[in-house]
Amino acid sequence: MKKLKKYSKEEILKLISSLDINEFSKFCHEDVDESDLLNLLHENIPTNKFPSKTVLGIDIYHYSQYKPLEQTLIPILYKLIYDRTAELCLSDSSYLFQHYTSKDTFHKMFINTGDGGFQIFDTPIHATAFAINFQMIVRYYNSFRYFPKLRKIIGPLSLRYAMTHDKIHKLDSNYFGPAIIYNSRVLIKDSLNRFLLDENTFTWFLHKINGIENLQNVSISQLKELSCFADYKEVDGDNNIYVDSKGFDFEKMISCDIQKIGNIMAKQTNLTVYNLHLQYKGVLGQDKYKTIVSLGNLNTSGIS
């Protein structure tokens, strides 16, 4: 896993205080020359070297419209689904998540919002696998095949997803960066429960696998050839989303469609947004029948 640039508030405050006036002054210093401090900050905080990461945003739609009891229970339900998703990633995508020692590794890279959150990954390939597993578990929950009593109390869950790829850094125990900011902006703009991507994510797939539509063709053999998987090794275990063979298996990811749907403004930055519709055929637990789940939908209406 690519390491994030990590800073503490104390070390940055120490840098600032070394060259700035850190006492209350009776004079106005609007004509101060800040170039020395700016140069020092650039030297110690090289933002151009911050690694790019993929952020998967997941939001439970219309959480505020649930009744008080349901609002109390939904964060618990989200944790149950999240933990099972992490376990599925570890057991059923062993090659892809070989650098994750346990589900705690997922927790360390997660920003919890109560009714969803932002999960940080090295690549969009990882994020897509996590989203598929998450949606599979939600389907089993919605169809009364997972916590059926809780399902009857809370009702069905409806989700919207967003995926962005940009720079991220860590300050103390918190994550910051445009990848998170843009993801939040994209996610909140959607009112049609879609799976939205930004331009960087779209371009990443274009450069790495010749377009996101080829996700349904991706095999472990192909992933091994990508530079972002250069430090990955052969591991024992299942690989149920991206197949563990040199051939293609259309029995798993059965369709993948992408549409350019519009632009939004985020922090004075214009973001191009794409709509992803992906279908996957899989099975959980002791169920003997395969189930097809969809991430996103094919609604072409612009973002609000």
Image: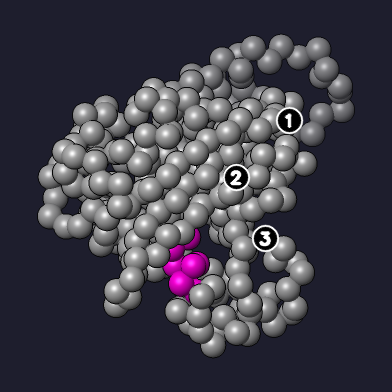
Which residue appears at 21% of the width and 29% of the height?
225
The amino acid type found where label 2 is placed reads Leu
Residue receiving disc 1: 265
Quadrant where the C terminus is found in the figure: top right
The amino acid type found where label 3 is placed reads Tyr
Which residue appears at 30% of the width and 31% of the height?
228
Rendered image: mark on residue 61: 3
The amino acid type found where label 1 is placed reads Met
The structure's colour scheme is one colour
* Picture quadrant where residue 73 is located: bottom right
**As drawn, is 143 to the left or to the right of 104?**
right
User: At numbered mark 2, what does the secondary structure look like: helix, strand or loop?
Assistant: loop
Rendered image: mark on residue 178: none
> Neighbour class for label 1 at 10 Å: few (<14), some, many (≥20)?
few
Which residue appears at 16% of the width and 38% of the height?
246
Q: Which of pointers 1 and 2 indicates the residue nearer the eye? A: 2
Q: Do the residues labelled 1 and 2 touch (CB within 8 Å)?
A: no
**Residue 184 visible from this viewpoint:** no
User: Along the polypeptide, which appears first: circle 1 or circle 3?
Assistant: 3
- Cα distance between the residues tagged 3 and 2: 18 Å
Quadrant where the N terminus is found in the figure: top left
User: Total label count?
Assistant: 3
Q: Which of pointers 1 and 3 indicates the residue nearer the eye? A: 3
**As drawn, is 56 to the left or to the right of 223?**
right
Q: Where is residue 15 in the image (x, y as percent from the top left)?
A: 55, 29
| Image: magenta residue range | 134-141
Q: For the stretch drawn in magenta, what is the main secondary structure?
A: helix
Which residue appears at 53% of the width and 35% of the height?
258
Rendered image: mark on residue 298: 2
